Amino acid sequence: MKDVFEMSDLGKMTFFLGMEVKQKHNEIFICQHKYAKEIKEKFNMKECKPTVTLLNQNEKFCKEYGVAKLDERLYRTLIGYLMYLTATRPDIMNAISLLSKYMLCASEIHFQAAKRIVRYIKGTINYGLRFCQVKNFTLHGYSDSDWVGCIDDMRSTSGYCFSFGFAIFSWCSEKQEVIAQSTAETEYVAAAAVN
């Protein structure tokens, strides 16, 4: 390419669009450690206590809680920051997608759930995507769903991920198109979505 284009070799890539790239022999690790720290600082959560779960499992969100609405700009900003973090953190994708549905009607309950995600990130700040050379390439796929995860429209959410070797290369989390009548039906719809 140097013969055709004027360019200079800067060596191995270490930082690109907020993502840190660490290259070793037969391994590449991509993370957003610095960006995650910036999120904590921007929202005054530098000294927060980490948590081991993204969301409270028993909590279901809805548009109307009967509580005062929050400054939507602050909530949108936090969700936007967290969405960019999902580039290297597929583990937080479902929770961010769930909370992003309430951008226009955010309450303090939604904001506290978003802050809980920041607390989870503090405890898992070194997470990222690791791609390495492996001898045995095995394809693994996982799917799961909840039942009536959304109180507003009574629909469930499906999710799946695929890994090849050690790294996840494809993942998805989306609301099901049908209203399932049982947990077995939600699981069947989730498995069918993987095809």
Image (cartoon, rainbow, N blue to C red):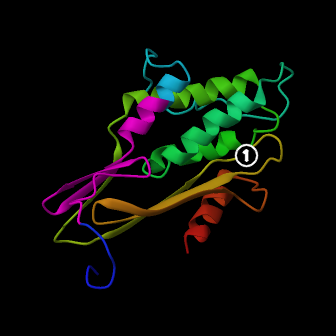
Residue 105 visible at all: yes
Nearer to me, 38 or 113: 38
Helix, strand, or loop for circle 1?
loop
Q: Is residue 96 above or below residue 15?
A: above
Image quadrant of residue 112?
Answer: top right
Q: Residue furthest left?
A: 25
User: Which residue corresponds to mark 1?
Assistant: 148
Q: Residue furthest front?
A: 6
Nearer to me, 195 or 33: 33
Please state, as top left, top right, bottom left or bottom right, where the C terminus lies in the image.
bottom right
The residue carrying pointer 1 sits among few (fewer than 14), some (14 to 19) or many (20 or more) residues within 10 Å by Cα, namely many
Residue at point 42% right, 22% down? 50
Residue at point 56% right, 23% down? 43
Residue 36: where, in percent of width, then height? 44, 35
Q: Is residue 80 above or below residue 88?
A: above
Q: Is residue 103 above or below residue 64?
A: below
Nearer to me, 185 or 134: 134
Q: Is residue 68 above or below residue 164?
A: above
Q: Residue furthest bottom?
A: 4
Residue 128: where, in percent of width, then height? 35, 47
Amino acid type of the residue tagged 1 in the rendering: Val
- Where does the magenta region start and end? 9-38
Magenta-colored stretch includes residue 20? yes
Residue at point 52% right, 33% down? 54
Residue 40: where, in percent of width, then height? 48, 26
